[in-house]
Image (cartoon, grey):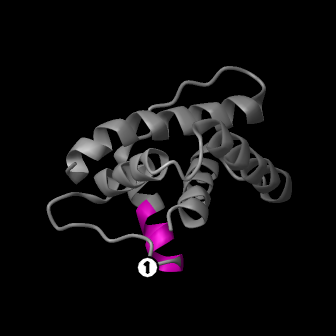
Amino acid sequence: MSEKELAKLGDAIVNLLASAILTLLKKRPVALKVPNDILSDVYRTVASSSPHLIKKPSSVNKATCIEAHFARIWLQKQISIDELIADGYEYAKQLQEKSGLNEREIVIRSLSYLISKYGK
């Protein structure tokens, strides 16, 4: 499967993760389409802290690379979507309690955390 094909599935996974994490944090339904600029920030965050985890083919952009990475994590049965949501929520809750970050930063840091933890 190509990066772009994986990214189509990964797009749905990323949107579900971000929406579910924010829904649990805010205690009300949140539906989020994660924009490419946030995914690019996730890429930069992971690449700077764990460069061995992310290898972007020259034919795809950073957002596509992140989406494909989440698809691989799930397809390789490393962790279930429910477990990703639960772990991402616990991490986001700690972030919110300690630093009061805005929604954008919570999404960036939570997705970066999940890739760093499970994307090996």
Q: Residue 51's x, y, as percent?
A: 44, 79
Residue type (three-letter) at the residue carrying disc 1: His
Q: Residue 16's x, y, as percent?
A: 53, 32
Q: Tell me what residue is drawn at x 61 percent, y 61 percent.
A: 113
Q: Secondary structure at mark 1?
A: loop
Query: What range of the chain is rendered magenta?
Result: 43-49
User: Looking at the image, is 21 positioned above or below residue 66?
Assistant: above
Q: Tell me what residue is drawn at x 43 percent, y 79 percent.
A: 52
Q: Quadrant of residue 86?
A: top right
Q: Is residue 74 left or right of residue 69?
A: right
Q: Tell me what residue is drawn at x 40 percent, y 52 percent.
A: 72
Counting the numbered discs, the total is: 1
Quick check: is 92 in the magenta stretch?
A: no
Q: Tell me what residue is drawn at x 55 percent, y 53 percent.
A: 78
Q: Is residue 106 left or right of residue 33?
A: right
Q: Considering depth in this image, is 72 or 65 the residue closer to the camera?
A: 72
Q: Residue 90's x, y, as percent?
A: 78, 48
Q: Residue furthest front?
A: 77
Please tell me whether the stretch drawn in magenta is mainly helix, strand or loop. Answer: helix
Quick check: is 45 in the magenta stretch?
A: yes
Q: Is residue 27 left or right of residue 102?
A: right
Q: Considering depth in this image, is 56 or 103 the residue closer to the camera?
A: 56
User: Looking at the image, is 59 positioned above or below residue 10?
Assistant: below
Q: Residue furthest top?
A: 29
User: Looking at the image, is 47 positioned above or below residue 1?
Assistant: below
Mark 1 nearby-residue class (10 Å; few <14, some 14–19, many ≥20) = few
Circle 1 sits on which residue?
52
Q: Residue furthest right?
A: 97
